[in-house]
Image (cartoon, rainbow, N blue to C red):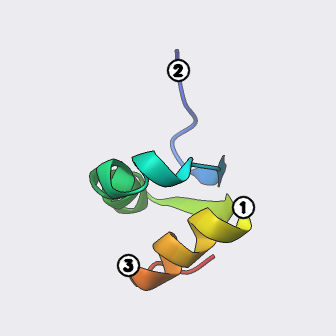
Amino acid sequence: MMLPVKGFILISIRDEDKADSINLIRELDEMGYSFFATEGTATVINGLGFPL
């Protein structure tokens, strides 16, 4: 699957997978992606210091 070079990504991660998703979120941020997220996932992303 090919992804655009940059843009917005909608993220919704179930509670039991949130801790395992931190590296993926960091990598996507470093690649230049911005995020939309569901409420619980947004809490995790904001807690890491990434803007939504």
| Amino acid at the residue labelled 3 | Leu
**Residue neighbourhood size for the residue with mark 2, other residues' Cα within 10 Å, grouped as few (<14), some (14–19), many (≥20):** few
Query: Pointer 3: what residue?
Result: 48
Which disc is residue 38 wearing?
1
Whether 30 is drawn above or below 2: the answer is below
**Residue neighbourhood size for the residue with mark 1, other residues' Cα within 10 Å, grouped as few (<14), some (14–19), many (≥20):** few
Query: Pointer 2: what residue?
Result: 2
| Amino acid at the residue labelled 1 | Thr
Whether 32 is drawn above or below 49: the answer is above
Q: CA distance from mark 1 to mark 2?
A: 24 Å
What is the x, y in percent for residue 2? 52, 20
Front-most of residues 21 and 14: 14
What is the x, y in percent for residue 49? 41, 84
Q: CA distance from mark 2 to mark 3?
A: 26 Å
Q: Secondary structure at mark 2?
A: loop
| Amino acid at the residue labelled 2 | Met
Q: Earlier in the sequence, mark 2 or mark 3?
A: 2
Residue 31 seen in render: no
What is the x, y in percent for residue 37? 68, 61
Mark closer to the observer (1, 2): 1
Q: Secondary structure at mark 3?
A: loop
Contact, mark 2 vs mark 3 (Cβ under 8 Å): no
Q: Earlier in the sequence, mark 1 or mark 2?
A: 2
Q: Earlier in the sequence, mark 1 or mark 3?
A: 1
Please give left or right for residue 10 compared with residue 30 in the image: right
Q: Residue at x 54, y 30 (%)?
A: 3
**Residue neighbourhood size for the residue with mark 3, other residues' Cα within 10 Å, grouped as few (<14), some (14–19), many (≥20):** few
Residue 16 seen in render: yes
